[in-house]
Image (spheres, rainbow, N blue to C red):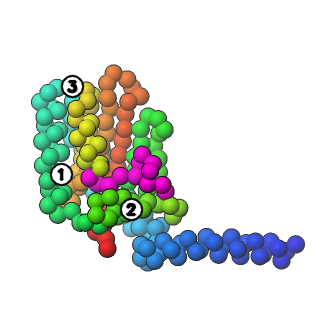
Amino acid sequence: MIRVRRLLLLAFLSAGCHGQVLAQKTLGRGGITAFFRDTALVTVSRFDARDFDLRIPAQRDSLRATVKRERELWRAQAPKNYRFLLQVGCFCPGTRGWLLIEVRSGQPLKAWDRAGKAVSLTDWNTLSIDQVFDNLERSAGRPGTAKVGFDPRWHFPTYVYTAALPGPDMWGILEARGLRAGP
């Protein structure tokens, strides 16, 4: 019985390590968990983000101009391939955990959760930076409020909070950090 338990434990550990080895080959030394650990610093927090009251036409125009300017700056220097951490939440289904998103030629290629498990790219919370900008532009056309912050170096949205009116259950939060140009 003890031998069977040891064999099962060895098989379980081998399977777990195999996934980590694949992630390590893909993401370099330390794999996925190291990426999450190395990118703990948030450059723009919700406290640094700018508020917009989208019920006021001048505020909507200001948000659109800000998004346009930051997107142009992003596109001027954006790496073709990159990785970043993304966390998205909304009233329903709630806040999801952080994901590591790998983008190639502007399109999400792979995504992993904090444990290194692959995440489906068809899920609503796997976005490229350009898709984050697209969502932000759409939000500017809805009556409500928005709070937005951008990375000072790369100019991508690092914090986005939107709430559409009239209901209290029409909110969304997006946080992005740790962008690294990749192969």
Does residue 74 belong to the magenta stretch? no
Dot 3 or dot 1, earlier in sequence: 3
Most frequent secondary structure within the magenta stretch: loop
Nearer the observer: mark 2 or 3; the answer is: 2
Taking depth in this image into account, of 181 and 103 the one nearest to the observer is 103
**Where residue 92 appears, x then y in whole percent?**
47, 35
Specify whether residue 47 is in view. Answer: no
Instruction: Give, as a three-letter code, the residue at label 3.
Output: Arg
Q: Which residue is mark 2?
A: 109
Q: Which residues are drawn in magenta? A: 119-130
Q: Which residue is mark 3?
A: 55
In percent of the image, x 22 and y 35: which residue is there?
140
Determine the secondary structure under disc 3.
loop
Taking depth in this image into account, of 111 and 55 the one nearest to the observer is 111
Q: Is residue 85 left or right of residue 144?
A: right
In percent of the image, x 70 and y 74: which residue is there?
11
Determine the secondary structure under disc 2.
strand
Q: CA distance from mark 1 to mark 2?
A: 21 Å
The answer to whether the residue labelled 1 contacts the one labelled 2, judged by CB atoms less than 8 Å apart, is no
Dot 1 or dot 2, earlier in sequence: 1
Dot 2 or dot 3, earlier in sequence: 3
Instruction: Give, as a three-letter code, the residue at label 1.
Output: Arg
Q: CA distance from mark 2 to mark 3?
A: 37 Å
